[in-house]
Amino acid sequence: MLLNNYLSKKKINCFIIVILSLFSSTLFSQIRDWNQLYQMIDRPVVDMKFSSISGISEYGLLFALPGNDGGLAYFTNQDSLNIYSIASNIGAISIVPDNPNERIFCVFGWGSFSDGLYEFDVTTQEFELVTYCEAFPHFVKKLSSGFYFGYGSWNMLGGLLHSNNGDNWTAIDFFNFKDVSDIEENGDGTLFVSAGYEIYIENEGSFNSFEAPLRINDIYIRNYPNNDEVYIACVEGCFSDAVYRVEYENGEITNLTFINCFFNLNRIYEYEGYLVVGCKYGEGIFLVEPEENGQIQQIGTGLGINDVYCFEFYPVNTSNFMVGTDIGVFLATNLTSASNNEITEIKYSISLSNYPNPFNPTTTINYSLKENSQVSLNIYNIKGQKVKQLVSDQLSAGQHSITWNGTDEFGKPVSGGIYFYKLKGDGYVRVQKMVLLK
């Protein structure tokens, strides 16, 4: 059903460069280049995909718009945006084109009796139900091994469906009753699936699992030549939300390498050798080095974005990425013209470490400040709960240290395990991990 056909009386210029001074970057202030694309779409965009289906303009770009009057959206010309849905009160949350057959698979709903996977015929502009789902749908994707549809929630039935060609869908029985939140495929064709707290790796037709610290809501595999690197977003809306790299060999996941913490992180992407991390609830967009305790830069401040839902490349510019947000689509360019030098400068001007690590019963946290700053230094457990505040004061530039004796705010010893310590000052945040042995 066609919900809206937006017509503009004057030509929309989708390439207006907005030069923004980002005064509140996590590490420093700098100039960034951004376009706000497709200004007709001044609403949440939760998924974007390119297609080669005829009749779709703007390089075949498809949009998933959630909520009331949302749905599958695409331009038939630069001035006309069409939105199609199964009902006016049910929006789309995930889309993927089937280019040879000129159809689009769409996931609709978020807790309604009509939630499910639908097939949209571009020629007839009609939807056909593929399957309902018994719990919240999460995604539909096309990988080299076929199409996949995942759904579920922490307290309801879930599962994972697969189709070789989009015509016949069958359940992958291993994931029956699991909350399947994402699936990706690395460069050699190995599947990685996330469900709840587990990250699964395919091994000769079966799946082996590894438990993550928090629930997993996104898997990202870097592009060639780094497409053996797998990253996950572990999230529960706490200060322990973090990106991890999945370490694996011979069909087994051996470890998760901590990259860094990001509060309410939602999606991972990459740009010019960095990971891009998009968060929700006003937490922002970041570049981070893809290494343990990687340095962080905040980008996109001042744009008014509260939620980041998806990423995609833009085919005109060679060094860029698009961001689907709560207020539309933004194109980011020229973000790393000075990033390498600036990150290197931060490495030498701000340090944070503790020794010994692992420790029992005490450890000393050492940190340096480039300039006078209001500083807080807090300890958090693996669930993101604040255990103890060690520092809250205006401090001078230079070296500082403080000892933590493994107790909470009430002086009671805490249990052994992983803890995070977070240093926050004027214009920067650093987080490190430590292990208390008992």
Image: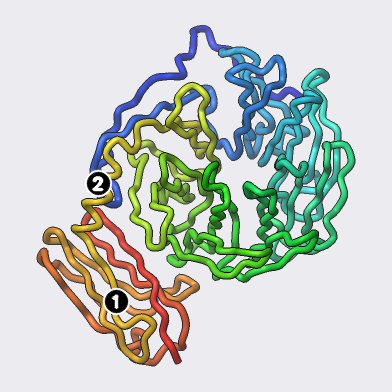
At horizontal 45% and vertical 92% (from top left) the residue drawn is 438
Picture coordinates of residue 290, whole percent (x, y): 43, 53
Question: Sequence-wise, which precedes: disc 1 or disc 2?
Answer: 2
How many residues crowd mark 1 within 10 Å: few (<14), some (14–19), many (20+)?
many
**Rendered image quadrant of residue 420:** bottom left
Left or right: residue 60 versus residue 327 is right
The residue that mark 1 highlights is 354
Picture coordinates of residue 141, whole percent (x, y): 70, 42
At horizontal 44% and vertical 58% (from top left) the residue drawn is 263
How many residues crowd mark 2 within 10 Å: few (<14), some (14–19), many (20+)?
some
Task: Label 2, secondary structure: give it.
Answer: helix
At horizontal 78% and vertical 63% (from top left) the residue drawn is 206
Please say if 42 is above or below 432: above
Task: Label 1, secondary structure: give it.
Answer: strand
Please say if 121 is above or below 168: above
Amino acid on which disc 1 is placed: Asn
**Rendered image quadrant of residue 248:** bottom right
The residue that mark 2 highlights is 342
Numbered-mark total: 2
The reply to whether callout 1 and callout 2 are in contact (CB within 8 Å) is no
Say which of 312 and 292 sits in front: 292
Left or right: residue 237 versus residue 252 is left
